[in-house]
Image (tube, rainbow, N blue to C red):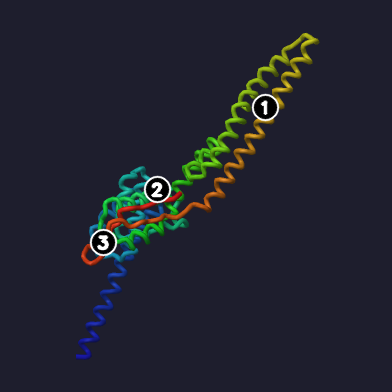
Amino acid sequence: MHKCLQIFLSCILLYTCAAAQNQSNVLNEVAEPFKSFRYAEVISIADSILDQDSLFSHSDLMEIYRMKAISHFSLGEEIYAKNCFNEILKNDPRFKLDPVQNSPKIITFFNQIKLDYLQNQITNNETTSYGQTNELLKTNTTLYSQKSMKSAVIKSILLPGWGHFQIERKKSGTLLVIASVLTLPPAVYYSYETYNREKDYLNEINSIDIEKKYNRYNESFKLRNGFLAAYAVIWLYSQWDLFSADKEVQPVEIQPGISTSIQGESVIITSIKLHF
């Protein structure tokens, strides 16, 4: 009996080692062309083995989907890449891409998919308990603030103060927009006047009018530089104030609404507040 037990345990050990070796070999089959940027080959191999996902560990399955998604994205097949990332999120909604192994462009693309996925989970009122959803949204609050700040930065670059309205700093935004409007148009106007008056001054041959036209040119030159300097200061202050405000972005606040019991677990979320 003891001998039979030893044989049985040895068989289990051998099977486990063989299975682990097989998983490692299959993962390497995908990883090798992936490292060589042979993305079409990666997709082909991954497709042929993903129907056997029950043979893989959770981490290996996530890695295969990750390499397949990046391969699709690199080939311009964003729809297929999104499908692969959604498969990852179905298995692990808290999955994050390592910034060391993945480019910022890939991470931004994935984060948007992750944000949409979590929002859809809540909107569809799938059987997600309040506690589970609250935890998921807390771990992804940065995605909301990143999306809001990205839009705010673009607006602020175009017009100082505009981006402040995106993050609910309306008082600062109003003052900065007014200051910008009072300095940028005059700067443009006097730039045009300086150009024209300089031409008039340089083309003037009458000695009596030379000094007069020079004074007009010099006046426009100084006003142009003054308004440009003022606008530059306002623009720089706007960017600094916007990035300082990033630290003050409030987290997601979730308020439970109607409570529903589903197989002994409650509740379904019906009210959500997002502060930016």
In the image: residue 197, left or right of residue 51: right
* Element assignment for label 2: helix
The residue where tag 1 is placed is 224
* Element assignment for label 3: helix
Query: Residue placed farthest to the bottom in the image?
Result: 2
Q: Nearer the viewer, mark 2 or mark 3?
A: 2
Q: Position of residue 172 (x, y in %)?
A: 56, 42
In the image, residue 234 sits, relative to residue 272, either above or below, namely above
In the image, residue 171 sits, relative to residue 203, either above or below, namely below
Query: Residue placed farthest to the top in the image?
Result: 206
The residue where tag 2 is placed is 109
In the image: residue 213, left or right of residue 128: right
* Element assignment for label 1: helix
Q: Identify the disc placed on residue 53.
A: 3
Callout 3: 10 Å neighbours few (<14), some, many (20+)?
few
How far apart marks 2 and 1 lie (CA) works out to 43 Å
**Residue 264 appears in the rendering:** yes
**At label 3, which amino acid type do we have?**
Asp
**At label 1, which amino acid type do we have?**
Arg
Q: Nearer the viewer, residue 180 or 136?
A: 180
Q: Are marks 2 and 3 in contact (CB under 8 Å)?
A: no
How far apart marks 2 and 3 lie (CA) works out to 25 Å
Q: Position of residue 248 (x, y in %)?
A: 52, 53
Q: Quadrant of residue 131?
A: bottom left
How far apart marks 3 and 1 lie (CA) works out to 68 Å
Quadrant assignment for the N terminus? bottom left
Q: Which residue does the image show at 41% across and 51% down from the upper left?
A: 274
Callout 1: 10 Å neighbours few (<14), some, many (20+)?
many
